[in-house]
Amino acid sequence: MQLDSIDLAILTVLQTDGRISNAALAEKVGLSPSACSRRLDNLEKSGAIRGYHARVSNKALGYTMTVIVHISLSGQFQKTLREFEEAVRRCPNVLVCYLMSGEYDYILRVAAKDLADYERIHRDWLSSLPHVVKINSSFALREIIDRPNVGIDASLV
C-alpha cells in the first residue's frame, strides 16, 4: 500500500493517541469525519495499522527482569524451524522472537519476575523447546529505549 501524506498524518496522530475519537482525528489531519473513517478503515484493512492495545508496564505486573536469549538449533530445515516457532509461541514469557542470520538462529526477549523465575522459564520452557542445542542468556541492566513504533518522517507528513 502506498501511504500518502494524509495517511502518514493519521498514523502519526494514532501513534501518540490511539484512543482519539474519529472526529478529533479528522480535525487534526484536515478531513471530514466520514473521509477520515474511510481512510482509517483502509489503513486497518491494508495492515498498515496492525491493531490497538494498551501498553502495560511489565514492571507494574511484577516482571522486573528482561532477558535477551540467543538460541541455536540443530539445523535450519523448514520442519525444524516450524516446530521451534510453534513451541516458542506457547511460552507466555517470550515477548519477542526473531529468526536471525548470523551466529544464532533466534533471539528472544523474555520477561521474568526475578532470577528464580527466569530459572523456571529456562528449565520448563526454553530448555524443552524442540531442536535447541544452545541457549545463551544476557540480563538487561537498564532499559534505555523501548519504542512501540518507528518514527514517521515529519517531512513526509
Image (tube, rainbow, N blue to C red):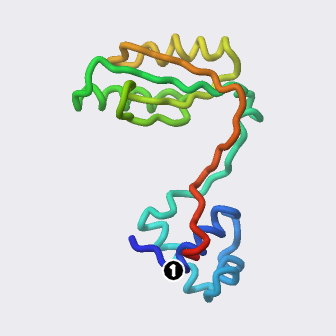
Give x and y (percent) for residue 12: 62, 68
Residue pictured at 53% horizontal, 14% vertical: 122
Q: Answer above or below: position of 75 versus 151.
A: above
Give x and y (percent) for residue 91: 50, 27
**Tag 1 residue:** 38
In the picture provided, is 97 more to the left or to the right than 21? left
In front of the other: 106 or 56: 106
Give x and y (percent) for residue 117: 65, 16
In the picture provided, is 137 more to the left or to the right than 28? left
| Residue with the most extreme right position | 60
Q: Examine the image and state in which quarter residue 64 appears.
A: top right
Residue pictured at 53% horizontal, 79% vertical: 5
- Counting every numbered tag in the picture gives 1
Residue pictured at 47% horizontal, 18% vertical: 126
Residue pictured at 63% horizontal, 49% vertical: 147
Structural crowding at the residue carrying mark 1, measured as other residues with C-alpha within 10 Å and reported as few (<14), some (14–19) or many (≥20): few
| Residue with the most extreme bottom position | 32
Give x and y (percent) for residue 8: 55, 72
Dot 1: element: helix
Q: Answer above or below: position of 38 versus 122.
A: below
Q: Answer above or below: position of 153 versus 60.
A: below
Q: Examine the image and state in which quarter residue 141 appears.
A: top right
Quadrant of the image containing the N terminus: bottom left
Task: Tell me which amino acid carries mark 1.
Answer: Arg
In the picture provided, is 60 more to the left or to the right than 117? right
Quadrant of the image containing the C terminus: bottom right
